[in-house]
Amino acid sequence: MPLTIQTNSATETKELGKKLGQLLKPGNVVLLDGELGAGKTTFTQGIAQDLEIKGHVTSPTFVIAREHKAIGKGPALVHVDAYRLNTLAEISHLDLASDLEQSILVVEWGKGLVNDLVTEPIHIQINQFVDNEERREFVISADESILEGLAK
Ligand SMILES: Nc1ncnc2c1ncn2[C@@H]1O[C@H](COP(=O)(O)OP(=O)(O)O)[C@@H](O)[C@H]1O
Ligand SMILES: [Mg+2]
C-alpha cells in the first residue's frame, strides 16, 4: 500500500525530500511524477540537502541529466529529466562519470522507465489541488523500511 503525505509549502516539500534523502542508499532509484510545477525539482533539492555533493540541484530540463559528484563519503546524485527519454538505456549513453550503482538516481517524469530498471524503484506521484496553490499530495510507493522511515 502506498503512503500518502501532504505538504503545505515548498519548504515542507524540501523537508520531506530531506527525510527521504536520509533513508536512501547508493543504487537507489527515485522516480518522480507530477505535472509541470508539481514540485519534483523542489523535492529533489530536499533529497540533496544532507548529501555531500557538488553543486546545487536545479531543473534538469534541457540537459536531460545532471551529475552531482560526491565530495564526501556518501553517494553521488544523478538527477535526470526523462521527459524526452524512452528508456533508461538512453541515460547510459550520457557519459556519466558516476557509477549508477554507487549513486542515487532521481528521475523526474520517471514513470515510463519503471520496466527498464533492475532495482525496485521508489515511485512518488505528486498531485496538486485546484483550491490550494501551496498544497501537494505525495503518493509514495517504496519498500516497508522506507515507508516506515517517512511515516515517523
Ligand atoms: N507544497 C509545495 N511543494 C512544492 N512546491 C511548491 C509547493 N507549494 C508551492 N510550490 C511551488 O511550486 C513550484 C514547484 O516547482 P518545481 O519544483 O520546479 O516543479 P517541477 O519540477 O515538478 O516542475 C515552485 O515554484 C514552488 O515554490
Ligand atoms: Mg522539474
Image (cartoon, rainbow, N blue to C red):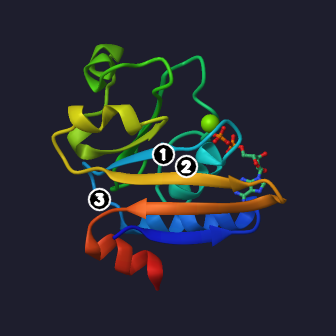
Residue 140 lies in what quarter of the image?
A: bottom left
Q: Pointer 1: residues within 10 angstroms few (<14), some, or many (20+)?
A: many
Picture coordinates of residue 90 (x, y %)? 31, 17
- The quadrant in which the N terminus is found is bottom left
Q: Which residue is drawn at 61% across and 62% down?
A: 137
Picture coordinates of residue 70 (x, y %)? 40, 45
Mark 1 residue type = Leu
Q: Which residue is drawn at 45% across and 27% down?
A: 82
Mark 2–mark 1 CB contact (< 8 Å): yes
- Label 1 CB less than 8 angstroms from ligand 1: yes
Outermost bottom residue: 152
The local secondary structure at tag 1 comes to strand
The local secondary structure at tag 3 comes to loop
Picture coordinates of residue 9 (x, y %)? 76, 64
Tell me: residue 36, above or below residue 84. below
Mark 3 residue type = Lys
What is the spatial separation of the Cα atoms under label 2 and label 3, in whole angstroms? 15 Å
Image position of 42 (left or right of 9): left
Q: Residue 25 carries which label?
A: 3
Q: In which quarter of the image is ligand 2?
A: top right
Mark 2 residue type = Thr
Residue 102 lies in what quarter of the image?
A: top left
Q: Viewer-nearest of labels 3 and 1?
A: 1
The residue at which mark 2 appears reads as 44
- Label 2 CB less than 8 angstroms from ligand 1: yes
Q: Can residue 21 be seen in this view?
A: no
Q: Residue 32 carries which label?
A: 1
